[in-house]
Image (cartoon, grey):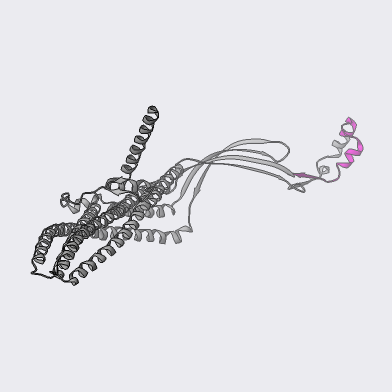
Amino acid sequence: MKRNICILGIVFSLSILNCQLSIAQRSYSLNQILDSARQNNITLRNAQRSVEAAEQQRKEAFTKFFPTVSATGFGFTASKGMAKMDIDLSEYITPEMAQGIVQSGILPVEALASLGQPQSIEMMKKGVMGSVMAMQPVFAGGQIVNGNKLAKVGEEASRLQLRLSENEVEKTAEQYYWQIVSLEEKMKTVNAVETLLKDIHKDVSVAVEAGVAMRNDLLQVELRQNDIESQKLKLDNATMLMRMLLAQYCGLQDTDFSLVYNPEAQSPVIEKQDHLLALLSTPEYQLLNKQVEAAGLQHKMAIGSNLPTVAVGAGLVYHNMMESGRSFGMLMATVSIPISDWWGGSHNIKRKKIERQKAIDQLADNSELLKINMQSAWNNVQEAYRQLDIARRSIEQATENLRLNRNFYQAGTITMSDLLEAQLLYQQALDKRTDAYTDYQNKLLAYRQAVGQ
């Protein structure tokens, strides 16, 4: 019996431990949320597949350096020979030859007489043919070389697009994270205010019963309590919805999780970067450079498509057309000159040159916009930090104001409306601190991404 009780105790302890581990696993820090978003977000998965597709395209372009090998087979049978020839041997057999043939007994007289009539011969009524050819391009106007370079640029551009997608996913995931933090902090504020109103309601109830306060004061407190209850309901619904959005966006298993954060910790302060140097490391700027490079390669390929192409090759051919098979090898060389293509090709070259210049102009213009965006993001960081500092100082002032007004009400020098106004200012100060804290975190992220960090 004791042994069974001991086993049950161990099982119960393990169950509690598993439950604690399960609860611990549902606690996420900001870094864990971002890691989950990078691994599970659908947008990033598709961007990664685009990189893989671009890599395969680059490998495909590399195969153009090698010979093209082809094999063909051909067989036919016709209703009659495709080649026909009439032969009149009488033109070639002289009377002396005919007399010698008869005397020697090579042919009887009847057969020799039939040779005097024209004979019809048919050939190639059926047959087969097969070949294996290999052609190696020698000169293609630089299209193969430039095509490989263009494919490599496309792969690099897809990787830059992946970085941009990662930045966007991280930004959205972190915004969801801080929105939930904001809602949870506001719920804590509402709970604290609810506790405060319960104490005030208790004090006013005693004062009303003692006849030293009006019942109207009690009704004002109860109305404010109803308003707090309504705020809690809205916060609960908003928090539940944001948890669902974050779980879906980051691939979390359920919405029953908690977030690890410390709003009372010292807010991080970052230094301003050299925006001109930071510009070079941003994926947006690098992508613009790739567009210029790609436009230049497309211009070169347009020129190459209007140049002669030279190729050499070798092959093995077998045919059986005349009741006897034969095979042979061959060497060959081809030169293709696109004469008429120059009529439209010259315009295509000019069009590609114009597009390259457009890409260069866009690089210069967007580079300035990117630097302006960096400065704007830095200004937002400074403003948000100051707003957070103001909000924290306002809490101290609102707390002291609430304490004084509560004492004044108990002393009978102010009305209940004044006390509830102080309570509302206190709640607003706490909410502003929460909003300022989450806004500062979002502004920090925006600046880090703007400078390519």
Viewer-nearest residue: 194 or 321: 194
Q: Write the residue at 35% across / 55% down.
A: 245
Against 359, residue 16 (above or below) is above
Q: In the shown orientation, is residue 359 left or right of residue 71?
A: left
Find out whether residue 116 is within the magenta segment.
yes
- Residue 239's spot in the image, x, y percent? 31, 57
Q: How far across and down, in percent of the image, does residue 73 sit?
A: 64, 42
Q: Position of residue 100 (x, y in %)?
A: 87, 33
> Which image quadrant for residue 423?
bottom left
Q: Is residue 371 visible?
A: no
In the shown orientation, is residue 36 left or right of residue 414?
A: right
Residue for point 42% across, 49% down: 143
Residue 401: % across, % down: 10, 63
Tell me, yes or no, whether the highlighted magenta stretch contains residue 412: no
Instruction: Report the label total.
Output: 0
Quarter of the figure that contains the N terminus? top left
Q: Nearer the viewer, residue 347 or 144?
A: 144
In-image side of 163 versus 191 (left or right) = right
Residue 121 seen in render: yes
Identify the residue at horizontal 24%, vertical 54% (top origin). 450
Answer above or below: position of 425 versus 97: below
Residue 141 higher or lower than 347, as above or below: above
Residue span colored magenta: 101-123
Query: Residue most toward the front?
Result: 210
Toward which corner of the image does residue 128 lie, by quadrant? top right
Tell me the quarter of the picture where residue 234 sits: bottom left
